[in-house]
């Protein structure tokens, strides 16, 4: 019966994730994670005989389910982060993302302070760090790729880069920055991510074959237009 209840709970949590009821889903995932810890660790309050094969298998299955739920949750979290940039109505969903990040940071802190905090486990999950990585990926996906730069027409490509960055950072300021806590320094995270993405493109371009006009365009853009 317990196993059936657990499987049902996993499916229900997955439904919460897909419906983007993200904070509630995360709360339930944390409960399941705690169940796993208690089953595995007598110091965490476990009463089961973890040495028996059936209990070991059950615990492994539960732990695997928790990891699969976290994968599904993170996919939705970062999808919301991506979609929110250009959506003036993204507030509620992005607000849930922030609540999840804060709840997970607290869970990481609790884990560090707990008795059974063995290295090599699933925590710390560092979802705030993963959020920053998601913003980096967002910037890289949104900007024109360097392969689009045509030989002899670099100026047009660089202008596209500039326009897209200005548009996206303006959208970030309008639509998402106010939804993050001040300590996230979110506008700085977005700005740095876009600058990093542009730097990677410029390095790739500079390492390629450039015509004289392209070299001039690149230098002119760097010194006179691209104001960091």
Image (cartoon, helix red, strand yellow):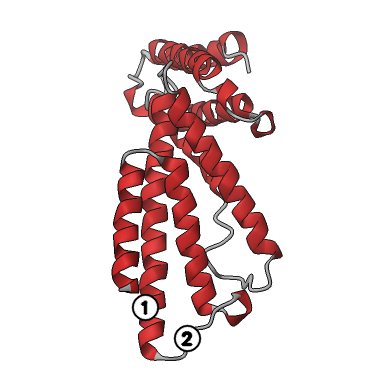
What's the residue at 59%, 29% (across, down)? 180
Query: Mark 1 vs mark 2: which is more N-terminal?
Result: 2
User: x and y percent of residue 60 in the render?
Assistant: 39, 75
- Image quarter (top left, top right, bottom left or bottom right) of the C terminus: top right
Determine contact: label 1, label 2, CB under 8 Å. no
Left or right side of 118 for 56: left
Number of numbered discs visible in the structure rendering: 2
Left or right side of 129 for 141: left
Q: Secondary structure at mark 2?
A: loop
User: x and y percent of residue 199 in the render?
Assistant: 53, 29
Q: Residues within 10 Å of mark 1 (few under 14, many from 20)?
A: some
Q: Which mark is residue 50?
A: 2
What's the residue at 47%, 38% (across, down)? 134
What's the residue at 44%, 17% (across, down)? 161
Q: CA distance from mark 1 to mark 2?
A: 10 Å
Pick whichever, 93 or 209, lies toward us.
93
Residue that label 1 marks:
58
Q: Secondary structure at mark 1?
A: helix
> Farthest residue toward the front?
1
Pick whichever, 33 or 68, lies toward us.
33
Q: Which mark is residue 116?
A: none
Q: Quadrant of residue 52?
A: bottom left
Q: Is residue 208 visible?
A: no
> Farthest residue toward the top?
224
Pick whichever, 71 or 107, lies toward us.
107
When the figure is inspected, residue 214 is found, relative to residue 135, above or below; the finding is above
When the figure is inspected, residue 183 is found, relative to residue 75, above or below; the finding is above
Left or right side of 89 for 11: left
Q: Quadrant of residue 101?
A: top right
User: x and y percent of residue 188 in the render?
Assistant: 63, 26
């Amino acid at each position: 019966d317990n196993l059936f209840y657990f499987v049902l709970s996993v499916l229900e949590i997955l439904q919460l994730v897909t419906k983007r009821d993200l904070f509630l889903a995360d709360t339930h995932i944390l409960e399941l994670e705690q169940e796993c810890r208690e089953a595995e660790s007598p110091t965490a309050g476990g009463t089961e005989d973890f040495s028996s094969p059936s209990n070991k298998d059950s615990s492994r299955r539960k732990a695997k389910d928790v990891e699969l739920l976290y994968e599904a949750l993170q996919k939705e979290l970062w999808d919301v982060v991506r979609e929110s940039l250009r959506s003036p109505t993204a507030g509620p969903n992005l607000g849930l993302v922030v609540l999840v990040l804060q709840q997970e940071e607290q869970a990481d802190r609790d884990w560090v302070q707990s008795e059974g905090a063995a290295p090599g486990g699933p925590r710390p999950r560092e979802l705030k760090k993963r959020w920053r990585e998601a913003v980096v990926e967002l910037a890289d996906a949104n900007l024109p790729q360097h392969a689009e730069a045509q030989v002899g027409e670099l100026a047009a490509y660089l202008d596209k880069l500039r326009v897209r960055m200005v548009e996206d950072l303006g959208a970030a300021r309008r639509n998402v920055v106010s939804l993050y806590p001040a300590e996230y320094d979110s506008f700085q995270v977005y700005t740095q991510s876009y600058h990093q993405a542009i730097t990677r493109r410029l390095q790739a371009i500079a390492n390629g074959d450039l015509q004289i006009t392209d070299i001039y365009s690149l230098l002119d853009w760097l010194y006179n237009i691209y104001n960091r």
